[in-house]
Image (cartoon, grey):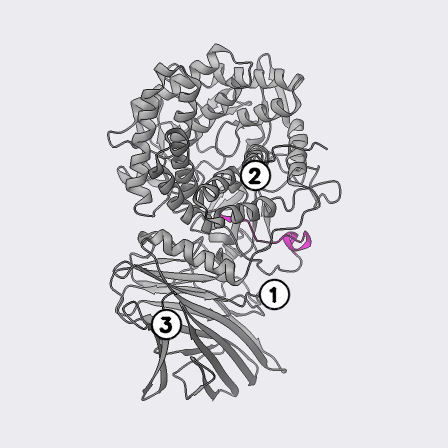
Amino acid sequence: MGIRVHIVFEQGAGGHVPSLGPTGAGPRLTLATPIRCARLRGGVDEFAYADVTPDGPDAWVATRSWESDGLRITVEDRYEAGDDVVRLVRRLRASGAADAIRVELSAELAEPGAVRYCAPAMVYSPVQHAEPGTQLFNDARLAYPLVLVWAASSATGVTLLRTSLPGYDEAPERVAGDSDYPQRTDIGAVGFAAGGERPALLATWPYREGDRSALLDAEGTPAAAFHPVGPEGLDVTVAYALTWRAAPTFADAVAGAYAYAAQVNPPRPADLPFTLEQAAGLRLASLRHTYTEWAPGAAGFRMNFDPDRGYDAEAKAFGASFTEHGMTGSHAILEYGFTGRQLNAAAMLAEHFGGEWDERADKVADFFVERLATPSGFLHTLYSIDKGRPLFSCGDPDGPVMHYLGAAEQPGTYLRMMTEAAGDLLLHHRRGRSRPAWLATCVRFADFLLAAQEPDGSWYRAYNPDGEPLDGGWLGAAGGEGKASTAVPVPYLLALAAALPPGERDRLVTAARAAGEYVLREQVARDDYRGGTLDNPNVVDKEAAELAMAALLALHDATGDPKWLTGAERAAKIAVTWHLLWDVPPRAGTRVAAAGVRSTGWGGINSTWGAGVTDIYSLFFLDAFVTIGRRTGEPLYETVADLAAYGCQQILSHDGDRFGFADTGMQPEGISFCDQGADAGLIAKGDTWGGLGWPYTAGTYGLHRYLTAKGNAHVVHP
């Protein structure tokens, strides 16, 4: 038996007003103005209900009809109460004068107290709603169209979600600069009004984004669609649910709301013309074409290229977080972490093909150790073939490098890039062809980490070669904000400890434990994760939660202590909700629509774009979702891992369809399901973009780890 909720209609001067909530203690919602109707030609009508009639046990139909400027409008809302839920089905009918309209509802918290909000793939942190204001999000920007408010005092999560998913979306009828415009779209919006005397959950049809929006420009101009009322009139039905669930933590509330959405509208994995094993094989076959040797002892992969034009074409520039990411010179830049992972690519090819690829992988590892490793343990993670030197990802003397825009007063690099490079070098040590210098480089980097570790167990997001932290701007302020990368080195330290003699392990495990305690204390206990992606500011993002999850799971693997699994699952409760559970209606004439790509399974990137801009980076973490799901008995994590594993193989070029790419085994970095900065020319709905090399490693190494966790590690080569 869940939380029993009931509905009371109160008669006021303006009509009937519904109040919804638990029969006992708990947060109640009041729809003081259940009908708000805005017209494109001007004017807003606000009403309570004129009539309310019973419609079965615990069910009522509430209506209001009116006429404004020649438009005849009727709103009919059916409410039905049950355990944990009130179902609301709204029917809107309009006819008469030519105009365009939008209807909205607001459910105010009667006794708010201290509350916290979530809109999955957009809002998780209290910092995001610290200032009073309204935040409304286009359905296509969310992993599922829902908004949650969690009341700490009653440990209850209240969710407003759309249960009838959008079915169509035509392009808006607007020119640059228009913020109110007609659009034939079934895309709505949900959100919240934070702070003030009456915090509330909000829903609109069609969508309105405000007080700020990323749809149009960097200034955050609000965007509002109005659905046309044509000669045939307008008759549309939209269904919602409002739920109440006990939730001892914010993470429990978020995961519970997301799981409920998956029950209401069960997601379906993408249908593929190949197996996952074949998908990995296609990428490995393509990856082989990027191998290059340009001088004696110099070897690597030119993975940064434009997949539309081929292996020799430089990658195109792209925009993210309203910042232009230039790709000039990128074809000659080798990345050893984050979006490149040269050593990982070499290890995967050696593992699957052997022979000459063993020898080539040795050359790639040797070049890294000889040219990018330093005696102090600091690792360079970028190398320019044209300049013949390593580059700094922060503060390089020649200016920003590609998409690494974190400014710094002194040169340095991101901790995550160094750690991933060292971890990938450790893969080569395990290949059975290790040179002493490879393991020695890994140990020196561990020494660098231990020397840089703060007394509280943390690390900063970036360091200079002397081990001094870099902070400010995109890197995060000194103190807690800049320590967003603390989880990153944990799996590496534990993996290196396992590769060393027993007498050399304790200091590494001790450092990993100290970092894990920091993550538990400062991130997991707060359910607050930021700064995972390096080509974006230190904002709330998907990878930050995934990195924390993976680190704590690694500690559970190494120690068996259940507190690490508990922490890993709590991080997973947030991380899993960045993945789309539904299919955003495509927009005709776009590349994504032409390819038949479904959005289910793709992961949002950060809280600037939400799930409106997605990538396949979660492939690196799907094995952790599978493992946590099986150890805890919670099926949600593995279910979403499966959705992502299949969904993220869409638009991978193969013999049956290259999707306009130059070869098979190619795939864009990301795709868009929602306009982002449309008036700035950044990303339009249905766009694909990117030419960085990381899809190769995500779709081989990451996918291989997922298949292994599922019990099938066999890769099929074309």
Q: Is there a contact, CB below 8 Å, between mark 1 and mark 2?
A: no
* Label 1 or label 2, whichever comes before in sequence order: 1
Q: Is residue 661 above or below residue 265?
A: above
Q: Say above or below: 451 vs 6.
A: above
- Any mark on residue 170, and which? 1
Q: Is mark 2 on a helix, strand or loop?
A: helix
Q: Looking at the picture, how far across and down is residue 396, in whole percent? A: 42, 28
Write the start and end of the magenta stretch as one range: 590-604
Q: Which numbered dot is residue 710?
A: 2
- Taking the image as shown, residue 560 lies to the left or right of residue 656, namely left
At label 3, which amino acid type do we have? Val
Q: Which mark is residue 474?
A: none
- Whether residue 20 appears in magenta in the rendering, the answer is no
Between 8 and 378, the one lying in front of the other is 8
Residue under the point 54% across and 68% down = 164
Identified at 55% across, 22% down, the residue is 385
> How many other residues sit within 10 Å of disc 1, few (<14), some (14-19) or many (≥20)?
some
Secondary structure at numbered mark 3: strand
Q: Which residue was labeled with disc 3? A: 5
Whether residue 591 appears in magenta in the rendering, the answer is yes
Residue 574 image offset from top left, x and y in percent: 41, 49
User: What separation in Å lies between label 3 and label 2 (alpha carbons)?
Assistant: 41 Å
Find the residue positioned furthest to the front. 1
Image coords of residue 639 (percent x, y): 53, 49
Res. 414 visible in picture: no
